[in-house]
């Protein structure tokens, strides 16, 4: 006969790094995660193992073989199945008490208020190129006073940004406005990781193609992101520990054994960022022109 599930027993090994009272506080928290791919799935499972029991998860996609290198829910047994449903099952297999509300159409202007209703923290796990959904969701967090965090899997490392109510917003930092998608992509890369620790070891540069909405990724980076985000979540949800908020950022690169803490007043309006954006845009324009000539 199997042992019945008991919350206190299942998460007893967290005690020491959190108090019993803090563990119970985590039990009552609600976290919204948009995106169930490379980082979204492992965010959910890591927070579930931390003892968080209430989630809103949003994803409209299904698992495919191309997801196998980085997505925790991608297996032969789940190919063709909705990502959000698979991940919800996996989370409940860790903790049958978990309450997961699934948003099978992803996040959009029509369901954002419902997606963020009663939420204590928003975790961004949207696809890199989901510019409209990301911009709308962070704007809604700012409007509703919900703390938000994002960690980008870059190379074999992770870059972190937190957006805390009353401090710099996502829009103030990235300054997307109504810019074209290519400009948003460049500003996103520059803003996420101004230290650029991942860039020197990109061995196949053509694997990054903004125009075709594709780029390389590793599972190591996704796992690092989840560890960092869950730690930030713990600090934010329990109200203890120092939380660095934008325009502060952090990037850790395991391949290069390097850690960088960045501070960019003005975000992408910072002179250093403006220069990086201009250089990246020139490089991208040349790349697109070269592909047009080859075609």
Image (tube, rainbow, N blue to C red):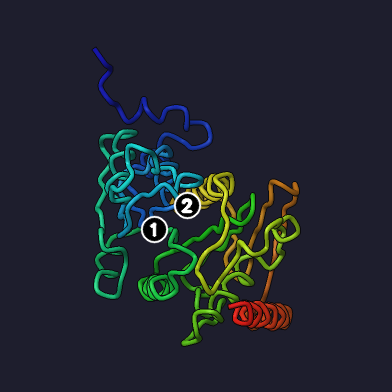
Q: Position of residue 287 (x, y in %)?
A: 66, 77
Q: Position of residue 195 (x, y in %)?
A: 72, 64
Camera-side residue of 165 and 111: 111
| Secondary structure beneath label 1 | loop
Using the image, determine if residue 295 lies above or below residue 159: below
Q: Tell me if I can see residue 52 in this picture.
A: yes
Residue 76 occupies quadrant? top left
Q: Residue at x 24, y 66 (%)?
A: 114
Residue 109 occupies quadrant? bottom left
Using the image, determine if residue 211 lies above or below residue 160: below
Left or right, 182 with reference to 133: right
Q: Which residue is mark 2?
A: 39
Direction top: furthest residue: 1
Question: In the picture, which quadrant includes the C terminus?
Answer: bottom right
Question: In the picture, which quadrant includes the N terminus?
Answer: top left
Q: Marks 2 and 1: CB-CB under 8 Å? A: yes
Q: Residues within 10 Å of mark 2 (few under 14, many from 20)?
A: many
Using the image, determine if residue 88 lies above or below residue 34: above
Q: Residues within 10 Å of mark 1 (few under 14, many from 20)?
A: many
Q: Position of residue 137 (x, y in %)?
A: 38, 70
Left or right, 261 with reference to 108: right
Q: Which residue is mark 1?
A: 35
Using the image, determine if residue 131 lies above or below residue 159: below
**CA gap, disc 2 to disc 1?**
8 Å
| Secondary structure beneath label 2 | helix
Q: Position of residue 194 (x, y in %)?
A: 68, 68
Camera-side residue of 206 and 47: 206
């Amino acid at each position: 006969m199997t042992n019945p599930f008991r919350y206190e027993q299942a998460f007893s090994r967290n005690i020491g790094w959190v108090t019993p009272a803090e563990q119970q506080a985590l039990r009552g928290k609600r976290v919204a995660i948009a995106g169930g791919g490379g980082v979204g799935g492992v965010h959910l499972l890591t927070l579930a193992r931390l003892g968080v029991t209430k989630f809103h998860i949003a994803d409209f996609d299904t698992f495919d073989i191309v997801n196998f290198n980085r997505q925790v829910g991608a297996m032969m047994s789940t190919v063709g199945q909705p990502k959000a449903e698979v991940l919800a099952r996996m989370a409940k297999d860790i903790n049958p008490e978990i309450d997961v509300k699934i948003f099978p159409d992803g996040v959009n202007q029509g369901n954002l208020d419902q997606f963020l209703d009663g939420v204590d923290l928003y975790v961004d796990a949207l696809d890199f190129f989901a510019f409209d959904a990301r911009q709308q969701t962070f704007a809604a967090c700012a409007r509703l006073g919900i703390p938000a965090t994002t960690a980008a899997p870059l190379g074999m490392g992770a870059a972190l940004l937190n957006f805390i109510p009353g401090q710099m917003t996502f829009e103030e930092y990235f300054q997307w406005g109504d810019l074209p998608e290519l400009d948003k992509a460049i500003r996103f890369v520059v803003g996420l990781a101004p230290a650029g620790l991942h860039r020197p070891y990109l061995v196949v540069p053509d694997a990054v193609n903004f125009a075709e909405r594709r780029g390389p990724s590793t599972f190591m980076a996704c796992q690092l992101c989840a560890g960092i985000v869950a730690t930030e979540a713990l600090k934010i949800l329990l109200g203890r520990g120092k939380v660095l908020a934008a325009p502060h950022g952090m990037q850790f690169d395991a391949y290069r054994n390097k850690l960088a803490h960045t501070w960019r007043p003005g975000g992408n309006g910072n002179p250093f960022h403006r220069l990086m954006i201009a250089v990246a845009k020139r490089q991208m324009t040349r790349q697109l022109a070269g592909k047009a000539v080859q075609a």
